Amino acid sequence: MPVAAPPLTLARLAIAFAAGALAVLLFHQVAVLMIARAGIAPLRAFVFDPVAPFGIPQVMSLAFFGGLWAVVFTVIWTRFGSAVRLPFWAAAAIFGAVAPTLVAWFVVAPLKGQPVAAGFNPARMWIGPVLNGLFGLGVGLMIPLGARLWGEQRRGTPSPTALRD
């Protein structure tokens, strides 16, 4: 059963940003590490190499953009969540698997001179949706937790018990 979303507040957006940044570190990057350690794909987790244009460590850049994606999801959920027939965590996981992956494939990759959609190579294409879906799952689990910890619960943010729906 869908959970009606409350109006946006600065606190809800801050919780979403923090949840997104943490989801990158605790879900996305841990999954990258597990895939790399299993020898499935040549990935590197928790990379601190500087990223252009500001020289910020890659993992911090990923966490920042994870926070932004979580804010985007929160805005979309606030507007359309009541029409979605999915639990909050499932909607977040699907959003994570689809939206950041499509932007990475069709906007970011060409800007970096990389092939679009991992070169349409199925052996490489599955990685983005899986990792980003796990990121979305983390967002979907941590936003309600963050809302509960910071007292947003009474304002209608989905509760951890809503995750059972």
Image: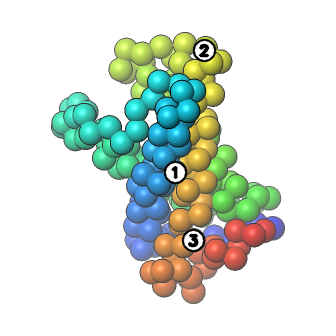
In front of the other: 115 or 25: 25
Residue bearing the label numbered 3: 144
Mark 1, other Cα within 10 Å: few <14 / some 14–19 / many ≥20: many
Q: Earlier in the sequence, mark 3 or mark 2?
A: 2
> Of the residues tagged 1 and 2, which is closer to the observer?
1
45 vs 118: above or below: below
Q: Amino acid at mark 3?
A: Pro
**In which quarter of the view is residue 35 placed?**
top right
- Gap between marks 3 and 2 measured at Cα: 36 Å
* Image marks 1 and 3: residues in contact by CB distance under 8 Å: no
On residue 109, the disc is none
- Gap between marks 1 and 3 measured at Cα: 16 Å
On residue 120, the disc is 2
In front of the other: 37 or 67: 37
Q: Is residue 161 left or right of residue 57?
A: right
**In which quarter of the view is residue 56 placed?**
top left
Q: Residue at x 63, y 76 (%)?
A: 159
Q: Residue at x 57, y 86 (%)?
A: 154
Residue bearing the label numbered 1: 27
